[in-house]
Image: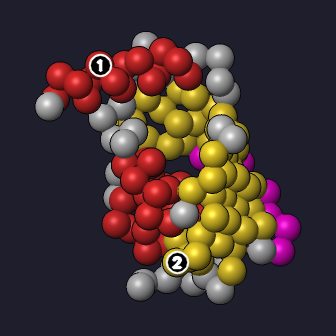
Amino acid sequence: MEHVGADPRTVAVAYIEATGRKQFDRVADLLHPELKAWTGGKAFNRDEWVTALRQFGPILVRNEIRQTIVDRGQVCVIYDFVTDTAVGAVPCVELLEIEEGMIRSVRLVFEFEHWPEVMAELRRRTSTAT
């Protein structure tokens, strides 16, 4: 595994940017093998998390980082998950725990108001692609 270094901010930014660029193998390299991730009341392990992120590829344009807040090994990343749907950007916050240069845990919170529209468009695109 290639590590970007132990600096928590550098690791967090690399992860958010790799996700936004749909570089999911790179994302996996940044995640600890025993990763625990949570969003929307669901828990994910490393492989499940990468699969969940990968599913948004058909609508994801990029991630635009707005702010990072670092407290020792924790990084809070505030960013826009920019889609090419009618919704456009979805505001997100991820709290990441960095351990030995890898992301050990993820807590993702996002603006839910227009999320059903995003998911409906994603389902439409993926159902016509198969």
Q: Quadrant of residue 78?
A: top right
Residue on which the image places disc 2 = 33
Residue plotted at (48% across, 32% down): 82
Within 10 Å of the Cα at label 1, are there few (<14), some (14-19), or many (20+) other Cα atoms? few
Residue 24 sits above or below residue 66 on the image: below
Give how far across and how far down residue 19 sits, in percent: 44, 53
Give how far across and how far down residue 97 sits, in percent: 72, 68
Residue on which the image places disc 1 = 124
Residue plotted at (45% across, 48% down): 52
**Amino acid under disc 2:** Pro
Give how far across and how far down residue 90 sits, in percent: 58, 28
Residue plotted at (83% across, 74% down): 72
Q: Main secondary structure of the magenta part?
A: strand
Q: Which residues are magenta?
A: 65-72
Near-viewer residue (107 or 23): 107
Residue 24 visible in the picture? yes
